[in-house]
Image (cartoon, rainbow, N blue to C red):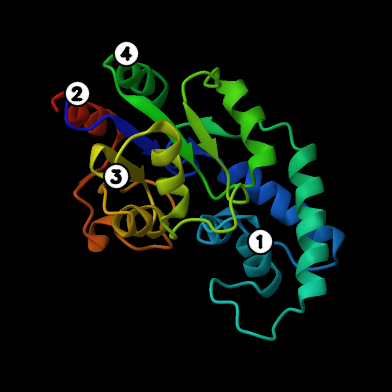
Amino acid sequence: MDKQLLIFDFDGTLIDSVPDLADATNAMLTTLGKETYPIDSIRNWVGNGSRMLVERAMVGKVEVLEGELTVEEADHAEQVFFEAYNNISGSKTIAYPYVDSGLKKLKDAGYTLALVTNKPIRFVPKILQSFGWQDLFAEVLGGDSLAVKKPDPAPLLHVCDALDVTPAQAVMIGDSRNDILAGQNANMDTLGLSYGYNYGQDIRELNPTAAFDDFATLVDYLLQG
């Protein structure tokens, strides 16, 4: 097996967390006296970490222009969002089909699994435990675990370094441009999933090494080596 390490994104790849993120976002907006948005709008704002989600929600669009929000406004809104998200039970966050059994099959086949998400690390352990996945991943990094996040390659290279694996022996697996670009920037193979959150863009346009429409097909591809 020339590939040893599988680095997974979290939201939009393994789990559909948008319903809970949307609830927290709208709770934040309500607290701040702003209009709320339907889940389909908020779905397009997820993937660059909590700060960008909050800023997009505050201005109501994907592209946040310089000067539209002050740092103080964004800081305050993000704290309100964190409180709202922390208070949500997480019951609406679900694993995508075949992810639970697929991850276990890959681990049983000898792959080392790691998780690199742009979600703040404080929210990750609770979600992993809710699915019983806390022991599946050899390394787990959040969006604020290092000074930079995906699409910067640093989190992926950090994981490789920690596990003594070369980028050539690793694969980045995700649903968004941040994942594919991070993998490409780290000089590792990338596998794209088309069902997640990619701002309306087809993941195949980013030229991953291969792309799949469901997790089961991805697992089969990896198990065939």
- Tell me which amino acid carries mark 1: Arg
Q: CA distance from mark 2 to mark 3?
A: 19 Å
* Label 3 crowd bin: few (<14), some (14–19), many (20+), radius 10 Å: many
Tell me: residue 92, above or below residue 190: above
Q: CA distance from mark 4 to mark 1?
A: 36 Å
Mark 1, secondary structure of its residue:
helix
Q: Which residue is mark 2?
A: 223
Residue at horizontal 61 percent and vertical 47 percent from the top: 145
Which one is in front in this view, the residue at disc 2 or the one at disc 3?
Answer: 3
Q: Residue 154: x, y in percent?
A: 45, 54
Tell me: residue 220, above or below residue 190: above
Q: Residue 22: x, y in percent?
A: 64, 50
Tell me the number on the disc at residue 51.
Answer: 1
- Tell me which amino acid carries mark 4: Asp
**Residues tagged 1 and 2 counted as in contact (Cβ below 8 A):** no
* Label 2 crowd bin: few (<14), some (14–19), many (20+), radius 10 Å: some
On the picture, is 12 further left or further right than 210? right
Residue at horizontal 50 percent and vertical 60 percent from the top: 44
Q: CA distance from mark 1 to mark 2?
A: 37 Å
Comes first in the chain, label 1 or label 2: 1
